[in-house]
Image (cartoon, grey):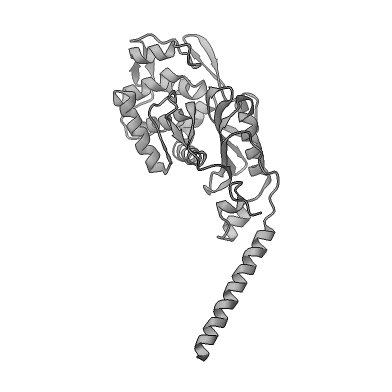
């Protein structure tokens, strides 16, 4: 009986101490400059730790338009790493890709002709810098024979990364390309973790030439000289349904942020709002020193601060 009472006392003491510790810990967390974004969903990640610092509806499935190309480019990089593809390989532009490149419905015009030759490097640059739809379609057809078969590779890589989503074409032309804000962060981390030099050689280009016509980057943070910007990719269905995933590094801290389904006028301010939250707060002292700091403690989805 005495042993039982002693165990009961110890259990109550430990529980009370733990509860007090959690409350003290929560009181000690002081973050500032919480992001305010217009996007329907968004999130920001610390690259090194992989911790999501803040999110808004980060697990909801959303259409992502041309941000889909980031996954397609990641598949191409994997193919290059495996020795199945090379940057200087010649790609024959199909009739399908040529038709897409001349369709006024899409903004990323390359004005290709069926049968013309482009290199893998140039096509990937087009896809990343000014969101050339036909360029990434041509890459997909070259690798897999069709965009549908290439989409199978995209979905396989998405599953490997741990993304929650589904993809039907490499360009993001279909609204059936869907994923979550947090999944896009995982994709950004994957491509910079494995192919930093390769992706930055594209994302840091302010423009490219296609058939002698200058095509400027769609990344206005790059064009406007945002401090530390390294990438990555826009996506647009309309002026009120736009997206952007951005990557930036200052000192030893690299951040990845994404906004989904936001007005075109707000997508870059959404990202800078999340970036500034990441720059101005030192999260490392919490997740390195106390394992109880979890994403839900600093998320707008379930904020307990």
User: For this rendering, which residue is in front, 148 or 200?
Assistant: 148
Placement of 200 over or under 164, stated as above or below: above
**Residue 36 percent coordinates (x, y):** 66, 38
Q: Position of residue 298 (x, y in %)?
A: 61, 50
Q: Quadrant of the C terminus?
A: bottom right
Residue 120 in sight: no
Q: Is residue 12 above or below residue 294?
A: below
Residue at 61% from the left image edge and 34% from the top image edge: 271
Camera sees residue 109? yes
Residue 263 sits in which quadrant? top right
Q: Which of 163/204 is in front?
A: 163
The image quadrant that residue 292 belongs to is bottom right
In-front residue for pair 305/125: 305
Coordinates of residue 275 in the picture (x, y in percent): 63, 39
Q: Residue at x 50, y 28 (%)?
A: 201
Name the residue at the bottom extreme.
2
Q: Is residue 231 left or right of residue 103?
A: right
Q: Is residue 36 above or below residue 12?
A: above
Q: Quadrant of residue 304?
A: bottom right
Q: Looking at the image, which residue sits at the far left?
A: 145
Count numbered badges in the picture: 0
The percent position of residue 266, horizontal first and vertical second, equals: 63, 29
Picture layout, residue 235 above or below residue 111: below
């Amino acid at each position: 009986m005495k042993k039982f009472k002693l165990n009961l006392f110890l259990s109550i003491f430990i529980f009370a101490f733990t509860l007090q510790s959690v409350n003290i810990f929560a009181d000690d967390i002081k973050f500032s400059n919480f992001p305010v974004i217009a996007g329907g969903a968004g999130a920001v990640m610390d690259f090194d730790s992989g911790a999501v610092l803040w999110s808004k509806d980060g697990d909801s499935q959303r259409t992502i338009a041309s941000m889909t190309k980031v996954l397609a480019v990641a598949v191409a990089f994997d193919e290059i790493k495996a020795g199945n593809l090379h940057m200087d390989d010649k790609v024959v532009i199909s009739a399908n890709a040529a038709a897409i490149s001349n369709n006024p419905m899409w903004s990323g015009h390359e004005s290709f002709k069926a049968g013309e030759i482009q290199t893998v490097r140039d096509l990937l640059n087009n896809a990343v810098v000014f969101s050339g739809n036909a360029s990434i379609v041509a890459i997909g057809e070259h690798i897999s024979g069709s965009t549908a078969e290439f989409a199978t590779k995209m979905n396989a890589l998405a599953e490997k990364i741990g993304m929650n989503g589904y993809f039907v074409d490499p360009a993001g032309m279909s609204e059936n390309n869907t994923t979550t804000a947090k999944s896009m962060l995982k994709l950004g981390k994957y491509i910079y973790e494995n192919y930093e030099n390769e992706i930055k050689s594209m994302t840091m280009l302010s423009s490219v030439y296609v058939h002698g016509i200058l095509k400027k980057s769609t990344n206005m943070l790059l064009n406007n000289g945002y401090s530390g910007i390294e990438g990555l990719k826009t996506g647009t269905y309309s002026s009120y349904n736009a997206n952007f995933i951005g990557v930036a590094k200052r000192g030893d801290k690299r951040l990845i942020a994404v906004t989904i389904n936001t007005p075109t006028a707000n997508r870059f301010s959404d990202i800078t709002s999340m970036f500034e939250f990441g720059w101005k707060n030192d999260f490392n002292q919490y997740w390195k020193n106390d394992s109880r700091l979890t994403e839900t403690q600093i998320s707008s989805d379930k904020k307990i601060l």
